[in-house]
Structures are given as C-alpha cells and as structure tokens.
Amino acid sequence: MRIASGVMMVIAVLTRLAGAEVTGQTDVFLVRGGTPASVLVLPKEPHADEQLAARELQDHIEKMSGAKVPMVTGKASAGRTPIMIGLVSVPEARAAVEAVSTDPAAFRLAVTPNGIRVAGLSPEGTLFAACELLELLGVRWYMPGDLGTVVPKRATVALKPIEKVCAPSFPSRHLQTVYQGLPWYRRQRLGGPRFPGSHGIPLLPRADFQAEPDIFALVNGKRVKNQLCVSNPEVITRATAAVIDYFDKHPDAPWIGMGPNDGGGFCQCEHCRALDSGEWDPYAAEPSMTDRYVWFFNQVLKEVHKKYPKKKIGFYAYHTYKLPPRRWTPDPHIVPALAPITLCRIHGLSNPNCPDRSFYRTLMTGWGELLPEVYERGYYSNLACPSLPFSKVHAIRDETRVAYEAGIKGWRVECMPAWVNDTPTLYVAARLMWDVNTNVDVLLADFYNGFFGPASKPMAEYLTMIDHAFRDTDCHTGGSFCMPVVFTSERMRRGRKLLDAAAERVGNDKDDAFAQRVRLYRMNFDRLESFLKMLDARNRFDFVTAKAALDHLRNLTRTMIDFRLYPNPPCDAPVEACNSSLDRQARALWWRSSRSYIERFWAPTTESGYDRTAVRGELVAGCDDQWGFLIDTRDIGESTGWFRDGPIGGNWQPMCTKTASWSDQGLHYYKGIAWYRAQVTIPASFKGRKVFLWFGGIDEAAKVWLNGTLIGTSAKPGHGLPGMAGTFKPFDLDVTAAVRFGKPNTVAVKITNSELNEIGTGGIVAPVMFWAEATSDGK
C-alpha cells in the first residue's frame, strides 16, 4: 500500500510548543521537579534496537532534566508512568498500524494517563517511535554530534495525551557516503532496504582475459577488459551461475546488483550491436546501451527464476544506459536506480532555468511507467567541489514530491558529509524521505531557531541567499567552476554582512554552541572568499597573490577538518590515520572531498603558475580570456589548416576559457573535437631568452601550434573522473624557436574531449600565458 505521508494517522492530538514546560491535570509526567516520574519498561528479551530506544530516551531525558529515568525489563512497579517499549503486540493496535502501512519502520506512539506506548512493527520501528517521542519533547538532531544536537532544559518533563501512527513515505531512505553508524542516521529515520552497488557483472567461474578474450568487449577490432560481451552465451551462463550462487549463500537477499563497469569501452561486435535500439543519448553523446543490458538481464532472470522465482536484479540507470529501453520489454524484476551523472545536479526538476532537470523528470516518469520498482541514485552534493558553500534545499523540496508521484520507491543518494556545508540540505532530505508532506518552510524555521538561537534571523537570510543563488543562476557546471558566477560581488558583500551580524548576536564564548556554529559557517565563507581571491588573482596572472590565497584556503580547510563534532572522539590522531568511520565523518568538513578536490583541480595550476613566474622565471604575456572557437565534428581542422598563421576566416566564435565552462556557454557536456585561436604579442625585450607557452589546464587533450608550427601536446588524459593524468593539469611547451618577438603571434589549439565528463567542462579551463626563464644574473 503506497502511503502519502510519514504521519498517517493522529488521534486526539493535543499539541504544545516544542521545548515548553506543560502542567495541568491532563499532563503525563516523565520527570517532575527534577525527580523521575516514569520508568522505562523493556520486554524480557529485548532486541538491540529496543535496548537502544530505551537508552536514547533515558539519556536525552537526563540531559533535559538531570533526572535518570530507571529502566526495567518485564513489568513496571506501580507509582510511576510506565513507558512501554517493544513491538506492537495488541491485535487492535497492530491492525491500526497495518491499516496504514505494513512497512517494518512503521510505529504507533500512544501517550495516555495510564502510560506511554512506544511500539513499532519491528524493533527498528520501535526505535523510530522513541525518536518521535523525543522530538515531541523538543529534542532535535540537526547534524551529528553534540554540536548538532539541541536538548531543551527543564526540571519537569511532560506530554499531553496523543496517539499517532507513523510510517515512511519511501520504503528505502539512504544517503550514500554518510556513515550508517552515526547515531544521526537512524535518529532521522533513515534506513530500509539498501539498493545494491551495481557496477560490474559477476561471472562464475571468473573469466581469464588472456585465455578467453571473447568473453570481453570488442572495441575497434580488439578485445579489451573494460566491459563484457553481453551477447556471448558463455557470459550469460556464467553470470547466471554467479547470481544463483549468490542467492544460495544469501537466501534472504531480495536482489543482486549488476551492470556495466563504470566508464566506457562497450562491445562493438555485431551481436551486441544488434541488441541495441539505435537511439542516440544526447546527454552522453553516445548511442544508448540500455537495451542490450535489459536483454541481458532478462536472459539471466529467466534462468535464475527457475530456482528463485522472486529474486531481482538492481542496476544503475547511468551514463549511456540511463534512457528507458525502446526495443526490449524489461522483466518486472529488473530494478533500476536512476543516476543522472551527465545531467545538471544543481537545480530542481521543475526549475525553468534548467532543461537538464526537465529532461530528467521525463526520464524518471518513463522508467516509472515501465517497471514497478524504481529507485533514485542521484546527487545531493556539488560533485567535485571542495565543500564550499552550497545548497540543494530548493531542489530537494521539489524533486522529492515529483519522485513520489512518479512511483520512486526509495533513495540511495550520493552526498559528501561536510556537515557545516551540507546540514540544511541533508537534514531536509532525510525529513522528506520519511514524510514527503513535511512543510519545509516550518522545518527550516525550526532549524534556524534551534540551531542558531539569537542569530537565527541573519543566518536564515544567509543560508536562504545561498540556496536561492544556486536556484536562480543559469549555471550547470559541477565542481567549483560555477562559484564565481553564483557568488557575485553583491552576494559576497551581503553574505559577509549577514555573517558578521550573526557573530555579533552570539558573542565570542568559545563554549557556547550557537557561537561555535556561527563561527564554523563564517569559516566556510572565509574559505569561499579565499577560493574566489585565488581564481581572480591567477586569472590576472598574479600568482603570488593566488598562491597566498591557496595557502590560506588550505589552512582554513585543515582547521575545519580537524574540528570534531563529538567532544570525546574515538581517535585523536590526524584524520588520515583514524580507522574510525564515525570519527572521520563527524567533523565540520569531510576530509576526503574538502581537501582532495582542492589538490586535484585547483592547486596544480596555481602552484605551477607561481613556480614559473615567481621562482624560475617571469611573466612574458598573458592570453586573453576570450579566444576564437570552432567545433570540429568531422575532425577536418588539421587537414584544412585551422592551425595556420594569420587570419583564416571561417566564422570563429568568441569563447571564454578561464572564466566560463563549455556547459555554461552552450556546449552542454559536449564531447568531440574543438579548436581555439588567439593572437598574442611577445615584447621584443625578451628576445634571446628561453620562452615557454604555459597552459594552466585543459580538458582533456591538447595539440598546440604557434605561428603555424606544431610545438607539442599535453599529457595523455586518464580515464574516469576528470582530474586524472593530463586532464586539468598544467603543462608548458618550449616555443623559443617559433616566437616572433615584438610582433603578434598566432596560437592555435586543437582540443580532443572524448571521455565521460561528470562535471560539464571542456577545452581550455584555466589561464594561458607565455613565460621566460630567469637569466643567469637573475633578470
């Protein structure tokens, strides 16, 4: 039964303001005047989740009132309000819950003058009921750790009578990368069946590439290891054997994940290509591979179902296999998880600024019409960004409702647990996964008030400004390439003013939770300022200033990574040496993304430019931001001389290099060949010096000419996520022999961009300059 809300039935509800003390004859007391007035009652043989539910209630009530409510098993003695913890056992009560939902996470919470019943259809449901009870008492868990927890203080703890049945809107609710061992995870009612990882096809026995090359994909006439030849009967036989073996070992598992390996290299043999629909995927810029894999899954399931009739195959609808199948009807036991890596991940599905998300809405609906069970495996972070200020609240409040109406059964959404940056986004997402009808405006107002206290007004304005900036900006590139566009000078001034006002309201007490929270948000804004300063300086070829800004960004990042959200962490070593997943994640910023993306995408250009112009040599001439640009879809540029010296005509269009991405200039995730041309005058004073042409970064490979002479190429790009091997890395070429000193010089660059691009960039993505080595006398 599909339910429309996380709170399905409330009986005789008498509400009060969260955190306010209540008194009167109808009150049900848990603590009275600092003395326990209740007792926690567990079953005789309690489940671990039931024990956890009791501890959560006991610990939080003690933090609230100073009184430790006793805990017993079996039956409570008279004189205190019993808080009964356990499964819904009374037939009438169980029927009332199951009338709403049979989801194991469903629960019934009843507060009556005779006692309190905290009961789920499963032990986990009972734990969720305890969390609901604590939230009725005003407890909030906005982010992990003590700093993210709000517990109101009061000597008397009481509730009004209430009876409610709650169940999740989505059976599966998961935030990928967030450690499930964080108490925050289950306090937000995250859980349910977890969609399986689905990269790769298991074979039994495994294939040996050297001995059995025909098992693998045929690409450009050669067998390669990237993918399997799914039309090969032997692949189907071995995959079927591997699936049956898995279910033999895991008979309770509902599904197994499988699919292509991440990346390209799909088989081009005539039998595999005959399985395709022939449809072109415009966002991947490649033929759709969906149909061949649907056909393959159908063959495997046909055999598996002879032994295990109801087992399912989960796969990622991703990359070039995200479009619904056109030729083959999928077995209803195929379960896709939509992972739109090649679409914009910033905006909501209904945002008129984003054609990508409109397309994704159609994609989601199309899969929902084909199959009874579809999951969402999208992205709640700014992919490849080092956790600079970002928000997707605007998108989540839109797309969660759309997904529900499209029949999506659950979520396994990729995110980066950089809590100071992502708390509003992840908190709102978790609440909507549980209850799709949550009033987000009310939820956010509660968050601002509870989390920031006296600074709630300026912090609400600041975080809303960030959310709306991403919502309203016509920018679709991932990573941090969009930051200078989103964060205009006016927004930066306003952000600083609001954060300063918030800091003034909370004061400087280092032990005050409100002050600590505001301080961390200000520090992340400082990171953004340093990042933008670095970009501005390097774009002006002022690499001394850019390097100083980079170093400041690194120091701030390290400080925030080292800030633990728990006061007594399980590991005191540097984050890299900690084996505790809880300690690694319960920090202001997530170390893996916050630091590594700085070093992968931004530091190499700045450090290389600094080395060339401040250590080993000096700037000769910087290239303009705009170059002449042409797409070369047929690869005719070299044969027709697009690299030659001087004016050549041909309707070259202006294209920005270091200040805007391809995607934000109309080349949405373009893959193929393109050319740049520019004119640069080299001062005559550098004649006799060794001169180099330096590129701060390209995506993916470049071939460079100066005045019609081929002078070299960039390093060979790697595969997968950009940032590997030569992609995005600076390089320089010795052009001394080809330079015309004191005269204009023609620079021509052929770009080849053919790999999967998860960010939306391409071509020249950083400053380009000429520099000269210092002479022996230091000049």
Image: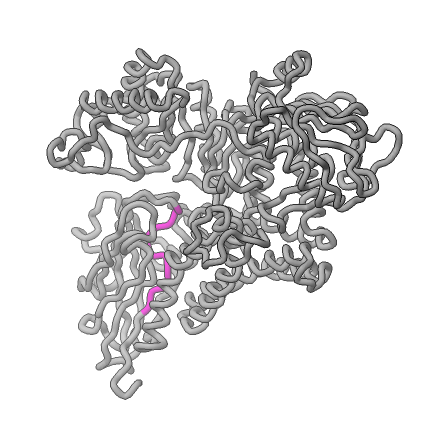
Q: Residue at x 68, y 12 (%)?
A: 92
Q: Is residue 478 above or below residue 504?
A: above
Q: Please check the rendered image and state whether residue 761 is part of the magenta-colored stretch, yes or no.
A: yes
Q: Main secondary structure of the magenta part?
A: loop
Residue 421 in percent (x, y) is at 55, 51
Q: Which residues are magenta?
A: 759-769
- What residue is shown at x 56% (from left), y 21% (from top)? 103
Q: Please tell me which residue lies in front, 755 or 334.
A: 334
Residue 673 left/right relative to 661: left
Q: Residue at x 66, y 24 (%)?
A: 74
Asked whether residue 180 is in view, the answer is yes
Q: How is the image coloured?
A: one colour
Above or below, 670 relative to 653: above
Q: State the image quarter where residue 321 is shown.
A: top left
User: Which residue appears farthest toward the bottom when viewing the image?
Assistant: 777
Is the N terminus in the top left, top right, bottom left or bottom right quadrant? top right
Q: Position of residue 4 (x, y in %)?
A: 61, 22
